[in-house]
Amino acid sequence: MPKTVWATVRQGKVELLEQIEVPDGTRVLVTIFPDDETEFWLGTSQVSLDAVWNNDEDDVYAQLLQK
């Protein structure tokens, strides 16, 4: 099962910030965050918020509130 852990890069090597068992040869996927993580998280959150708030299925509730 996939697991997400925080890490930093020091002298070109990825160092995990928590101690976990990772067998040699394990394939990993590395996501590079921008230096200013605020913009990243705002952009990522906006996608989720748009999916929740901007959908036609919720229009029925707006109609009920008008009555």
Image (cartoon, grey):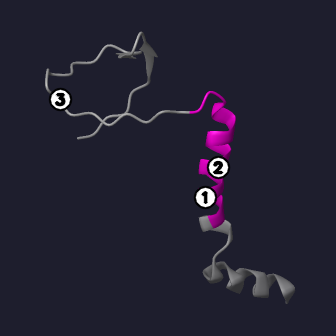
Q: Which mark is residue 17?
A: none
Residue 55 on the magenta span: no
Residue type pointed to by label 1:
Val
Q: Main secondary structure of the magenta part?
A: helix
Q: Please report contact status of discs 1 and 2: CB closer than 8 Å, yes or no.
A: yes
Image quadrant assignment for residue 42? top right
Mark 1 or mark 3, earlier in chain: 3
Quick check: 18 above or below 59?
Answer: above
Mark 3 or mark 2, earlier in chain: 3
Q: Specify the segment rendered in magenta.
A: 34-50
- Cα gap from disc 3 to disc 2, whole angstroms: 30 Å
Query: Residue 43: where, in percent of width, then height?
Result: 64, 49
Residue 45 on the magenta span: yes
**In terms of secondary structure, where does tag 3 sit?**
loop
Q: Which residue is mark 2?
A: 43
Residue type pointed to by label 2:
Gly
Quick check: 43 above or below 16?
Answer: below
Query: Residue 58: where, in percent of width, then height?
Result: 66, 78
Query: Residue 6: where, in percent of width, then height?
Result: 44, 24
* Residue for point 14% across, 20% down: 24
Quick check: 20 above or below 63?
Answer: above
